[in-house]
Image (cartoon, grey):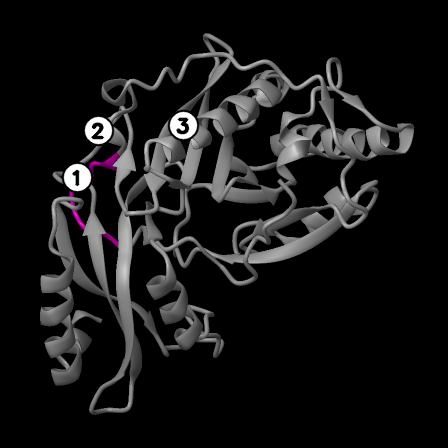
Amino acid sequence: MSHLLETPSAYEWIKSAVSRHSNNIFGKIVPAVVWIDAQDENGNMLVPLEPSELVSEINSEPYVLLNGHDPGKPIGQVIEGKLFVNQDGIRFVAAILGFYAGGDVLQFDKLGFDTKASVPSPKTLIELPNNARIQIGVDPREIEPLWIDQLTMNAEIQIERLTLSHNEANATIELIRVGLPYLALVWNPFVTAIGSEAGKATYAAFHSFCRSLIEALVERRNPVLDIQGYQNGCTVSFLFRGKDVNKSFAAHDALPKAAASAAQLITKLKERNMPAQQISYEFNKVGSVWYPSHAILEDGRIITDSMKLIAFDRLSAELSLGTTVSPLAEQIN
């Protein structure tokens, strides 16, 4: 598809866009085609997205570029995009990609953030609203809808189903993205008090569903469970990897303190005039603790203590935009 970038209008736009975005944030900036109106043998769009909406999303905020579609492996951003039509009538979206490796990468430890500090669970929380819900997003080409049907049929809380689009021919992971109200992440069933029994039951329903989901991961091939919450302008992801139920239960037990720590980190970043757009946490089984693997700031910079995280050897077909056909809604903080 690279020949499409030689379309005169696209070629001139690329030259201008690369010049506009050349800075110290990214080590390498390259053009690429991220959408084309091609179809597979069954007549389905290869990338089932509305191109104008994709361009709008790319241009409205930093669009994270993933290694595969693993949310814990960001290697850059899709910085800017534009829809073109070539001389043969083929529609395509050209984009400018910025890769972190070799750029101005910040580090938590050098910035003075104590990412190992423990924050206690809150003693009390407000009740969740009546419309509080769980959002579950998967790519149906990776995880069959029937599995999600069986998982959600007896849920005691409202479930909203979303469709993800990873656009990988040979996916190595099965991503399950779950969106929760942030308060449900910091709730500790052994510590936190709620104003009423009904309010407590709502929190317990969120907690119980997550436990049942963790148990069901043993049925998957190579699952990655991404439990997300939205806090103070930032999306926070807690990544559960693999089918080890005991490890995942330990991670879930440690989640309330980790979510409280993440909220504190978001506040501290804002106080330094470094507001975060996304933060991802990984679980260390040895210490039974969560730690932030990376944070992506609103100005495009990344913070990580692992240079290996953002490294790449070559551009490949396994780079993913990690798109959501129905975006995760911002729920109550």
Instruction: Say whether disc 1 or disc 3 marks the residue closer to the N-terminus.
Output: 1
Q: Position of residue 318 (x, y in %)?
A: 31, 51
Residue density around tag 1, few if under 14, some if 14–19, many if 20 or more, within 10 Å = some
The residue sitting at 45% across, 8% down in the picture is: 286
Q: Would you say residue 311 sits in the magenta stretch?
A: yes
Q: Position of residue 29 (x, y in %)?
A: 14, 54
Q: What's the residue type where badge 1 is placed?
A: Ala
Quadrant in the rendering for residue 110? top left
Quadrant in the rendering for residue 217? top right
The magenta stretch is 310-316
Q: Quadrant of the N terminus?
A: bottom left
The residue sitting at 48% across, 25% down in the picture is: 264
Q: Which mark is residue 101?
A: 1
Q: Position of residue 73 (x, y in %)?
A: 34, 38
Q: Are marks 1 and 3 in contact (CB under 8 Å)?
A: no
Dot 2: what SS?
helix
Main structural element of the magenta stretch: helix, strand or loop? loop
Q: Are marks 1 and 2 in contact (CB under 8 Å)?
A: yes
Q: Position of residue 20 (x, y in %)?
A: 13, 63
Q: Which mark is residue 79?
A: none
Check disc 3 and report the residue beneath it.
Answer: 268
> In the figure, 103 relative to 77: above or below?
above
The residue sitting at 74% across, 49% down in the picture is: 159
The residue sitting at 42% across, 41% down in the picture is: 278
Instruction: Say whether disc 3 or disc 2 marks the residue closer to the N-terminus.
Output: 3
The span from disc 1 to disc 3 (Cα, nearest Å) is 25 Å
The span from disc 1 to disc 2 (Cα, nearest Å) is 8 Å
Residue density around tag 3, few if under 14, some if 14–19, many if 20 or more, within 10 Å = some
Check disc 2 and report the residue beneath it.
Answer: 307
The span from disc 3 to disc 2 (Cα, nearest Å) is 23 Å
> Is residue 272 visible to us here?
yes
Left or right placement of residue 307 versus residue 292 in this view? left
